[in-house]
Amino acid sequence: MTLGELKASLNQNESPNNSNMLEYAIEKLTDNKFNLVVMGEFKRGKTSFINAILGEAALPVAVVPLTSIITELIYGDTPSAEVIFENGQRKTISLEMLNDYVTERSNPNNEKGVKKVVAKYPSNYLHEGVILVDTPGVGSIYEHNTEVSYDYLPEADAVIFLVSSDQPISKAELAYLIDIKEYIDKIFFIQNKIDYLSESERKESLEFSRKVLEQTLGGSVTLIPLSARLALQARQSGNQEMLLQSNLPEFERELSEFLLKEKGLLILTVAINRGLQVTNNILRHIELELKSLEAPIDLVEKQLGDFKKYVEQIERKRLDAHYLMKGQLGELIKQYDEDTEGLKKEKLPEAIKELDEALEKAKAGPKAQISDVLDNAVKNIILSIFTRWRSEEEKKVSAGFEYIAKRLIDETNGIAQEIVDKASDIFGLSLSQIVGTVMLLDSKWFYYMSKEASTSIELLAAPAKSILPKVFAAKVMYADAKEKLIRYFDMHCGRIRGDLYARLDDSLLALKGMLDERVTEMVSSIESAVTRGLEYRQKNEVEIQKRKLELESYKERIERIELELTSYVNKIG
């Protein structure tokens, strides 16, 4: 690996920042995480599909809806799992004990308070940083399973969406798919259980499913027919003919192509960019030190003093750029506030009307169920409104921040280039142009809070409702539900606002710190190179000539590596 060779070539007295940048680049290439999330309605064979990919029945499956907790599969030399609880505690278990924590049967309604389980498995799929994620199915009688899957959506980098050959696509699946599409650009569509059908039935079923998906999404869809059951059997027995019959290899080819082209190239670009920054820094350092070894000492000392005075002047420019960007973050939040007012005017009346309809339906049932029906209605209304709203606002804010970040990056690159140009002018050298910063911007996500602890007043009021006549009890419960709906509506608007503001501010500070560090390191590199040359001038001529030869040899090695990295850039471009 060229980056590894570059790291090994660094001199001992080289800047720690150069080493850190290379560590970052190498880590991105070798340890980058990519969440590939398997989603769909309950009993579509999601867990069986993951087991087929792994080639072993690593995760538990059953006839009834089973998975109730998010399970992340990462690479590990030895199979094991870690249970991460909602209170922050962790517990290491064997894969055989997964049933006790991730299934509805052994952990009903998540009474054990499990946040997620991270399982390790020695699979080639997971070796390159891909994380396979098993999610609970939506649409079953266990509503909390649906919530768990929805909450994980923002974590996904790509989704594998499973439908089944033994039953047509439902309205609930299509609604879920529309919500997924709000978050995820890349969705792999798989129609599982093709071994249940004859050849003619399979063709008819695939055509129908594809047509429904394309009508829903408004574009062409690649739907891959597959049998997870046959694929797992084939992998376990080594039966290549059965593996081809399962059609798993077709999916594997499409996934590999996506990971290489879409994910791989972006990460590779960032990594090579860091490598070029390092070679750029080193070559500039070498040129400056060679100059200070040859020019008159008095002249070099004066040039160094002039450069330090210039750096003090340009510091104000860096601060001004940051304050300008921070002001633009305020404009993003102002736009969010305007959007929120529009949301309330449009959606809150619709939400109350939907609650009214839920009340009318609840009146037809037993009085004891009215409160639960209204509570579920409030929860589902909030979930429905804010799932899409959150996605829309995330996209707006993300686009806005990317624009601001790009301006700050461009401004910093301009300042860095100005410093190099000034150094070239002061020291009488033609120093290399800087390599502009390219970054991957990570994000945090907002999560719902659709539940809250009962207050003491609510607990005291509950028995009173139970003794009221049904018609009066319904009115009281409706009033409570309506108040809760409005309160939750405002709460979520406020929580999203607070979350967005904190994330924007944190992200800008982190970006500024990273960019400032680069400029500071560049200034320090220039000054230290000249200072080191001056220190060698105090030694005898033999030592000075020896140092020159060392620098020339070092320069030759770095130029060769830089040439290789540049050739990679040309190939990618």
Image: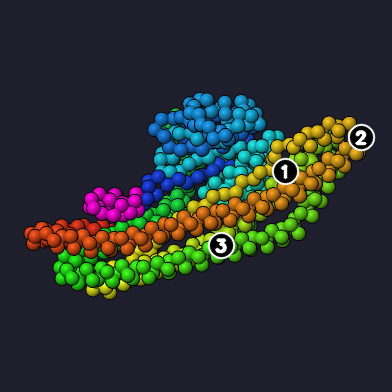
Magenta-highlighted residues: 1-23
Q: Mark number for residue 396? A: none
Q: Residues within 10 Å of mark 3 (few under 14, many from 20)?
A: some
Name the one closer to the observer, 520 or 242.
520
Q: Which SS class for mark 1?
A: helix
Tag 2 residue: 469
| Residue at the spot 17% in from the left edge and 68% down from the top edge | 297
The vertical placement of 561 against 87, above or below, is below
Rendered image: mark on residue 379:
1
Front of the two marks 1 and 3: 3
Q: Earlier in the sequence, mark 1 or mark 3?
A: 3
x and y, in percent, of residue 312 in the image: 36, 68
In the displayed structure, does residue 216 sit left or right of residue 258? right
Pick the front one: 450 or 172: 450
Please say whether residue 382 is visible from this viewpoint. Answer: yes
Q: Residue at x 45, y 43 (%)?
A: 130
Please identify the dominant SS of the magenta region.
helix
Q: Does residue 191 appear anywhere in the picture?
A: no
